[in-house]
Image: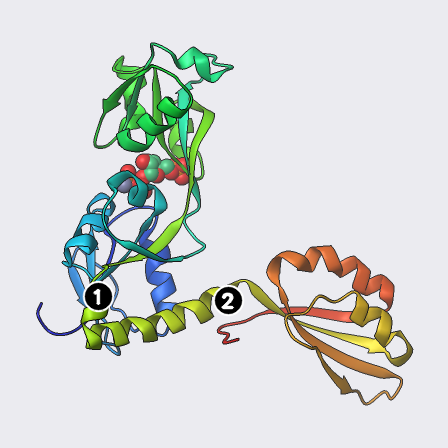
Amino acid sequence: MLNGNLKLAVQKKGRLTDKSLQLLRKCGLDIEEYSERLIVTARNYQLDILFLRDDDIPEYVQDGVADVGIVGQDVVREKKAEIEVLRPLGFGKCRLMIAIPEDKNINSLSELNGKKIATSFPVILREFLEENRISAKVIEISGSVEITPSLGVAEAICDLVSTGNTLKLNKLKKTFTVFESGAALIGNTRLNEDLERSRLLNRLLLRIDSVIQAGNSRYLMMNVPKEKLTDVLQALPSLKSPTIMPLADESMLAVHAVISTDTYWEINENLKSAGASGILLLSIENMIL
Ligand code: PRP
Ligand code: ZN
């Protein structure tokens, strides 16, 4: 393992595993299909990927076992490890929530007073209860928290909710949100002392940034009658100045622009009513601003 490669920790099995590998592949890294192996080396980059339990990743990064890691902000906050959050990654969005059995009702936080709440996030939950002046008993469980109400161990749970399937399967329902989370890239705070690995990380960060930027952007193409050009340009909040090109039909122009993904549906109708036609929206693989 002392090979000078950058060591990146990824969740071994869970919500973030596939998306983490997808991000790395979009960054051009040739990574072998993951199968029960603990370490995989990229074929075209000096990078070792370590597959670990997500709860352990902050500590491994703190201690330098891994240089960087992809992990939920929930685990980062829970573990209070000495690490640096390098980038939010835009995927793995979920919420840490308090949930109760479907056939029970709780309308206000104060009704949690005196209740038992099972969780694998005792630190965050205790902070939340304290802030809201609730005195409830926190029961620390390392996994399968969702079955504790049916076993009579707790009256409520505090766990991550993404699609909500786990809650539904266990006949639980959401009540309060404790923390909003998403995946982040974290790094060891002393990594800058190692020039070679810092260089490897910086090159990787450049790629990650351009993939994230591309994911948030779309390439928009449309045809516009010459006399409508000003109206159409006004309806267009593009990242940079749009490209305008002549068409074979001399009364028309082609307008191309990069826009942010979120704005497309907002501006689509305005573009049409301003006179644009043949509107195409394409995804972008990679983008450097
Ligand atoms: C979390 C949580 C639930 C599941 C919720 O597990 O503990 O089991 O995700 O997702 P859903 O709402 O889409 O069903 P995680 O992936 O963090 O794995 P872990 O519990 O093994 O750490
Ligand atoms: Zn976990």
Distance of mark 1 from mark 2, alpha carbons?
Answer: 25 Å
Q: Give the quarter of the image for residue 169.
A: top left
From the viewer's side, name the closer residue of 160 and 209.
209
Looking at the image, which residue is at 75% across and 86% down?
245
10 Å crowding of disc 2: few (<14), some (14-19), many (20+)? some
Instruction: Report the label total.
Output: 2
Q: Earlier in the sequence, mark 1 or mark 2?
A: 1
For ligand 2, tell me if the residue under mark 1 lies within 8 Å.
no
Residue 276 seen: no
Q: Is residue 263 left or right of residue 117?
A: right
Residue 66 seen: yes
> Where is mark 2, residue-wise?
213
Q: Is residue 119 above or below residue 134?
A: below
Q: What amino acid is found at the position of numbered circle 2 in the picture?
A: Gln
Looking at the image, which residue is at 35% across and 46% down?
73
Residue 156: x %, y % from top left:
35, 19
Circle 2: element type? helix
Residue 2: x %, y % from top left:
8, 70
- Quarter of the image that includes the N terminus: bottom left
From the viewer's side, name the closer residue of 237 and 147.
237
> Where is mark 1, residue-wise?
191
Q: Is residue 99 left or right of residue 239?
A: left
Residue 144: x %, y % from top left:
26, 30
Q: Is residue 158 above or below residue 271?
A: above
Q: Give the quarter of the image for residue 69.
A: bottom left
Looking at the image, which residue is at 83% across and 76% down?
224
Q: Tell me the mark number nearer the camera, choosing from 1 and 2.
A: 1
Q: Quadrant of ligand 2?
A: top left
10 Å crowding of disc 1: few (<14), some (14-19), many (20+)? some
Q: Is residue 287 above or below residue 265?
A: below
